[in-house]
Image (spheres, rainbow, N blue to C red):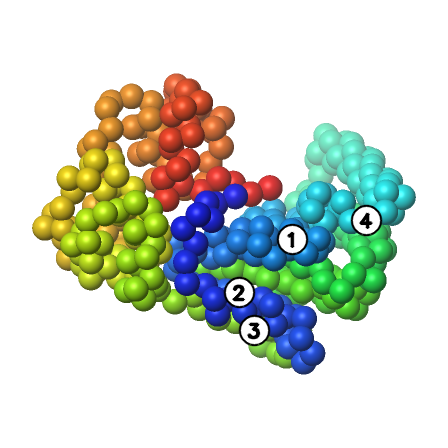
Amino acid sequence: MASLEHFQDREEAIAAFDRLWQAENPWILAFTGFSGQGKSTLLDWLAAKRCQPQAMPFALIGVGTAAAVIGQAFHSFLEAPSLGGHLPREAMAAYRRERRAALDERNRRHMMLSQRQVMQDAAGGNQQMAANLEGAYREMEAQADEVILEAWLDCFEMLAERERVVLLLDNYDTFQDSVDLKMLQRFWGVLEQARGRVPGLRVVLVSREPLRHQNDLRLFHNGLAADDLPPLPEADSEMLLQSMGVTDGAYRQAVFVRLAQGHPLLTEMAANAWHEAEGVLSANAVPRLTSREEAVAWVQERILERLPEGALKEGVRWAALLRWFQAESLAAILGQTLTPDEFRRLVRYAFVIRPRV
């Protein structure tokens, strides 16, 4: 989870979430905006400050490319303890049995087809035969998904009596970039069926890009509320930097006017840089940069120049590029492992995001 310690100025977004269950309001809420605007942190805040205190069944999932396998995406929703923990054990057990049986049957048929393909290749099979097999594989996947999703809906329906249930979807832009319209229609079609069975279901998603195919996805016509997350106003930028311990007022003003212009992530990164410089990074050192990429590069360089050579400095270089990573994957890239203290220090930087399930 991202740090919520310095979460600022999202009252309108939070109010939009609270209104989701009011009559006549759309049941899908989308927040869009540039990377670093605080979209993922907003989801974390909603989970921690709205869903958990109200004992609301919810799943906070980074859909990304995982949703390209529709059955796997919906499986992740149920397997989230914050949602699955509200379901009867018997219902979860029945769903898992049906899912396992469908996957086993699919795998059995895959194996039989693979054996046939080997035999046809040995007999000089042509391209048409190979194309037919590919079509058969896709049909098997679709049939398994149908069985799994029906079992999923039956299990999810056990939440029908709950007044509020919510799915919080991160990285939706990655998902919509990786699939076609047919897959998007399938994904949202299942969610629409789920809402038909569980009237209290709502969906909140965040995306760096506007939602695509809105004209082709019928449920978006009346069921979607979309909003851009705005930059921080100067007063909130000032408050954020103060809350992060930046005591130099001139530096705080320079960050807003010349560097970040209210961009939340850049503002936090500027605070990181000020602390790394032990408070000697002055307002005069802050350049006037209108390009976000140049501003990010300048702040990261200020952080890097203060770090001694070693695993942590290399980790910062790579983390700034990757943003999403795990300790194991970063160690593989670096060829060396960060100590626990170095890793904890690394993930405190504003530009580092820990991966979601």
Q: Position of residue 344 (x, y in %)?
A: 42, 30
Residue 14 badge: 2
Q: Name the residue carrying label 1.
A: 53
Q: Amino acid at mark 2?
A: Ile
In the picture shown, does residue 314 fall above or below 291?
above
Residue identified by numbered label 4: 87
User: Does 140 appear above or below 216?
Assistant: above
Q: Nearer the viewer, residue 320 or 271?
A: 271
> Of marks 1 and 2, which one's residue comes earlier in the chain?
2
Task: Give the label, 1 or 4, closer to the camera.
Answer: 1
The Cα–Cα distance between marks 1 and 2, rounded to whole angstroms, is: 15 Å
Q: Earlier in the sequence, mark 1 or mark 3?
A: 1
- Using the rendered view, name the quadrant where residue 214 is placed: bottom right
Residue, x 39% and y 54% (percent of image)?
36
- The Cα atoms of the two marked residues, 1 and 3, are separated by 25 Å
In the picture, measured across the screen, residue 82 lies left or right of residue 296, that is: right
The single residue placed furthest to the left in the displayed view is 284
Q: Which mark is residue 225?
A: 3
- Give the mark nearest the N terminus, 4 or 2: 2
x 38%, y 32%: residue: 346
